[in-house]
Amino acid sequence: MNRRSLLAVLGWLAVAALTTLTSTWAISLLGEGLSERVVTPVSQADLARTLASASAVPRPAVPSRPSAAPGKAFNTQGGSLVASCDAGRAVLGSWSPAQGYAADDVKPGPDAAASLEFEADAETVKVTVTCRGDVPVTAVKVEREND
C-alpha cells in the first residue's frame, strides 16, 4: 500500500471515530431530559395519607342570627363576601378568601361598620362594609408590602 492510500485510510478512520464520538455525545445530551422520569405518580394511599396529615384551615364563623335584608355579594382581589344591613347596621354574612389569601381581623357586626382583611404574603386587602339605608356599601383598601 502506498503512502497516499495509507493516509486516506487513516484520515477516513479518524473522521469516522470523531463522528461517532460527537454523535454519541449529542445523543447523550438529548437523552438526559427524554429518558428520565420527571413526574412520579402518587398512589391513592399516599394521597390519602397526605390529606389526612394536612392541617385543617379554620373556616370563618357565620353569624347565627339571620339579617333582616338579603345579602349582597361583593368581590375583591383578595376574596369575596356577602354583606347585608340589619336596621341600618352592617353584617357580614359570609366570606371566602381568594387562592393565596387568608381572612383575618374579621368584625362581622352587626355594627355601624363590619370589616375584614384578606391577607397574602405581600398584600392586604381591607374591606369595610357600611350601610346607606338598608343597602350595604363596601370600601376597599389594598396595602402592598412595598407601599
Image (cartoon, grey):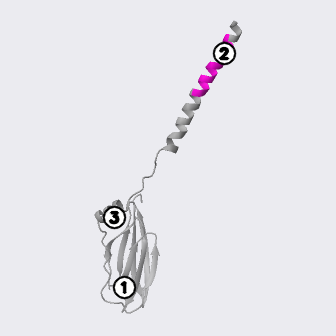
Determine whether 57 is above or below 8 in the image. Answer: below
Lower sequence index among marks 2 and 3? 2
* Residue positioned 53% across, 40% down in the render: 31
Quadrant of the rendered image containing residue 86: bottom left
Magenta segment, which residues? 6-20
Q: Which residue is mark 3?
A: 48
The amino acid marked with disc number 3 is Ala
Regarding mark 3 in the picture, which secondary structure is present there?
Answer: helix
Q: Position of residue 15 (x, y in %)?
A: 63, 22
Q: Which residue is mark 2?
A: 9
Name the side, left or right, on which 23 lies relative to 68.
right
Mark sitting on residue 75:
none
Q: Closer to the camera: disc 1 or disc 2?
A: 2
Quadrant of the rendered image containing residue 7: top right
- Judge the density around disc 1: few (<14), some (14-19), many (≥20) Cα neighbours within 10 Å: many
Q: Which residue is mark 1?
A: 90
Mark 1 and 2 residues: CB-CB less than 8 Å, in contact?
A: no
Q: CA distance from mark 3 to mark 1?
A: 42 Å
Q: Position of residue 1 (x, y in %)?
A: 69, 7
The amino acid marked with disc number 2 is Val
The amino acid marked with disc number 1 is Ala
